[in-house]
Amino acid sequence: MISDLIRNLMNGADIREVLPGVVFTIIVVLFSLSFHELAHGFMAHKLGDPTARNLGRLTLDPSKHLDPIGTICMMLFGFGWAKPVPVNTRYFKKPRRDMALTALAGPVSNIIISFVSVLVLRIILALSYDAGLFMYTGFSSQVITGQSIGTILVCLLAQLFYYFHILNLYLAVFNLIPIPPLDGSRILFIFLPDRLYFGLMKYERIIMIVMLLLLFTGFLSTPLSLLCGLLSNGMNALISLIPGL
């Protein structure tokens, strides 16, 4: 994440080692958060709710979706959120089920992006020794010094897909936490009685402040990173079943 990249730069890393990661983080975060919210709106639309469409939220335009604090957290720590797509459950035939499906669409879209990205990354690694070298040593000045432009571009492409893989995985896992205002809390709607569910939602702002403190101190980001690492290993193990990868 950008916080790690800045820390590396302060510890003496070459700017060439840090700058691509900063640029790729910004690109991936803007796209992934927008795609996440587009998936929510698209699912709600398919289930009969035109609210997102009427508000212009069925788009990849980041300006329609980004929450300033959530975007900054995503770039700095890898965990964040976007501006929730408005949903009107009165349009749903089965409000509890359809609300859960709408909430689940965002994290599922990011898991799909993550899996496709690591699949493409593994293909690049299988075809390029230099890209494989990058994965083991990092995009360091030692790796790129004296390399051709083509080799550098392949390494950059590998790094871009790695960022798409890991950041989308982080985004999916984080948003599945069952506390408001994250998607996991909306999925709870299908299981909890109305009184208990809406009672919990009253404390959304307080819960958000506590969650931000846990992110800044690392108490939340550390276990979530470990979980994402396990899921990443699982995806790679599944892809390893494909001959040649």
Image: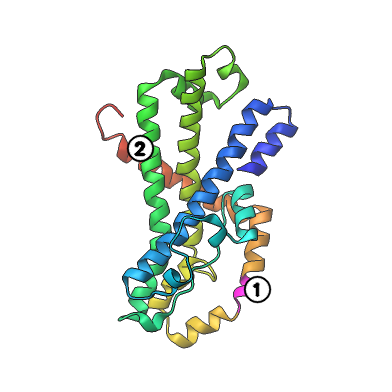
Answer with the quarter of the image where residue 3 lies. top right
Name the residue: 40% across, 80% down.
89
Residue reaching furthest to the top: 146
Image spot of residue 56 (x, y percent): 47, 66
Q: Quadrant of the N terminus?
A: top right
Circle 1 sits on which residue? 206
Q: What residue type is labelled 2?
A: Leu
**Could you say whether the residue bearing mark 2 is in a helix, strand or loop?**
helix
What segment is highlighted magenta in the picture? 203-207
Magenta span contains residue 106: no
Q: Can residue 111 be seen in this view?
A: yes
Q: Is residue 101 visible?
A: no
Name the residue: 36% across, 66% down.
43
- The tally of labels here is 2
Magenta span contains residue 206: yes
Proximity of marks 1 and 2: CB atoms separated by less than 8 Å? no
Image spot of residue 182 (x, y percent): 52, 66
Q: What residue type is labelled 1?
A: Ile
Image spot of residue 90 (x, y percent): 39, 84
SS majority, magenta: helix
Q: In which quarter of the image is the C terminus?
A: top left
Answer with the quarter of the image where residue 7 lies. top right
Name the residue: 31% across, 34% down.
240
